[in-house]
Image (spheres, grey):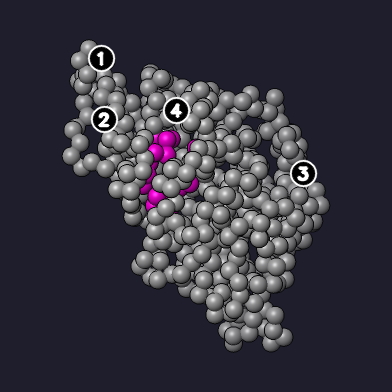
Amino acid sequence: MKTEQTPKRTLNRRKFLQLSSTAAGLALLSACAAPAAQPGESAVPGQEQILLRYSHWGNEDEKASTWSTLQAFMEQNPNITVEQMYIPEAGDPYLQKMNAMAASNTLPDGALFPDAHTLNWGLRDMFLDLSEIYTGEHEKVDAIQYRTPDGRIVGVSGAQEIQLIWYNKDLFDEEGIPYPPASAEEAWSWDQSLEFAKQLTVDINGNNALSAAFDPTSLDRFGFQIGLSDMPVITYMRSNGGDIFNEDWTGLTLDAPQSVEAIQMMADLMNVHSVMPKLTAGGTMSTDSGLLSRKIAMAMDGQWVLETLNRVRREEGLNFGIGVLPYIQDKVTTATGGPIIAFSASQHPAEAMQLVSFIMDPANTPDYITGGLWMPNEKRWYHEPELLSIWIDNENHPPEYKSAVVDYSLDYVTRPLPIYRLPNWPGMWQILNPALEQVWLGEKTAEEAIAGVMPQASAYFDAEIAPLMI
């Protein structure tokens, strides 16, 4: 979930209210709500007035949406006042503020928290165990639960965001190429997708990558683009039967032949087949810019780009579609999302968990779901027809969305990403990423790069990860 660059949302709130019994009375749809009680004032006679604080990052739209959700919570809980702590910058600046507040014992009660540090803070008992509030109808999707080795849920992503294929339909129509399949049953193999990517890749003279006259040094359009962060890399390792870690997270399998082969296949898209932008040529383009400019025909990216692509469709006329990922051996996608947590330092832990539970209920954040930015984090939203209709039956979700996204996520998100299970995973990626860059740049083969980095990776795993997994 990429919350730092979210565009303005277009919502269908009337339909949401008509269909969702759980959303009745939410203040997000009311511009004339009564003001919440101030700290020290009791909105309910005879009840203590409790003050909670909730921190988050994001743009101005997200700030407003979050405040609306907090207002809704306060309307339903008049003895609780929630102070919004808005920190615009994500990443290190946000974490620095969290560290400073931890040192001064001024942490908020709940927060959107940096995913790279969630498990480590959880292992230091900085967060409340949320297991008891995410049961029954509020059970969350397994792959987006931040679980400590002893089984505590210390955070859950606000949304489940999976990897998909996004493409410019007009380019496929002009070249007479079928659209990427919108169902896993019909998914392209890696070789099929490569063949189509070659047809869609053209040089400045209009020759595609299958032509004898093709000039790979002067390209006008690329047929394919895959991001080179940990999420797509792990996705295709798994598609080839490999992974960075074994099934029970107790050892490295980075140097397994299947893992190494998948890395090389990704690099070959750039350095052998010339169907994907090279790092030396400026690297990857944003999906919306690439599709709109017709410089990229299809791209692998997260579900979160749907909201942006819808805006570009309305404003610029982009004719885009959604497909499932091509596969090597196994059909696989992966899920991610920013975690929402409750701090153990809260003076009101029960109310802090009550607030987090409210924010994490998809019925209380319709903006994000109907607008296309988020997929729901609760299992029942993928199965119950009424909830599914609230989510996808609107202009922001194209007809193929049900099979390409909903059904795909149910059956092919088979394992969490390392960040959800392994403490100190970001340090491991900092070791692996420079080695992989040598492969992306064509300086080393995948076999050479992985063999070179394995001693350091193994030593880090043994010293920084394995001891915390007991």
Q: Between label 1 and label 4, give the one nearer the viewer.
A: 1
- State the image coordinates of residue 54 (x, y, percent, origin top left): 36, 32
- The earlier-in-sequence mark between 3 and 4 is 3
Q: Residue at x 35, y 36 (%)?
A: 21
Q: Within 10 angstroms of label 3, few (less than 14), some, or many (20 or more) residues?
A: some
Q: Between label 3 and label 2, give the one nearer the viewer.
A: 2
Q: Within 10 angstroms of label 2, few (less than 14), some, or many (20 or more) residues?
A: many
The span shown in magenta is: 359-378
- Work out whether residue 464 or residue 209 is closer to the camera in this orientation and state it: 209
Task: Report which quarter residue 438 is drawn in.
Answer: bottom right
Q: Residue at x 43, y 48 (%)?
A: 389
- The earlier-in-sequence mark between 2 and 1 is 1
Q: Could you tell me how many numbered marks the image carries?
A: 4
The amino acid pointed to by label 3 is Thr
Give the residue number, with chain letter if any, for mark 1.
47
Give the residue number, with chain letter if any, for mark 4.
342
Q: Using the numbered discs, state the Cα–Cα distance from disc 1 to disc 4 in whole angstroms.
A: 23 Å
Mark number, residue 75: 2
Residue 349 visible within the image: yes
Give the residue number, with chain letter if any, for mark 3.
253
The amino acid pointed to by label 1 is Gln
Callout 1 secondary element: loop
- The earlier-in-sequence mark between 4 and 2 is 2
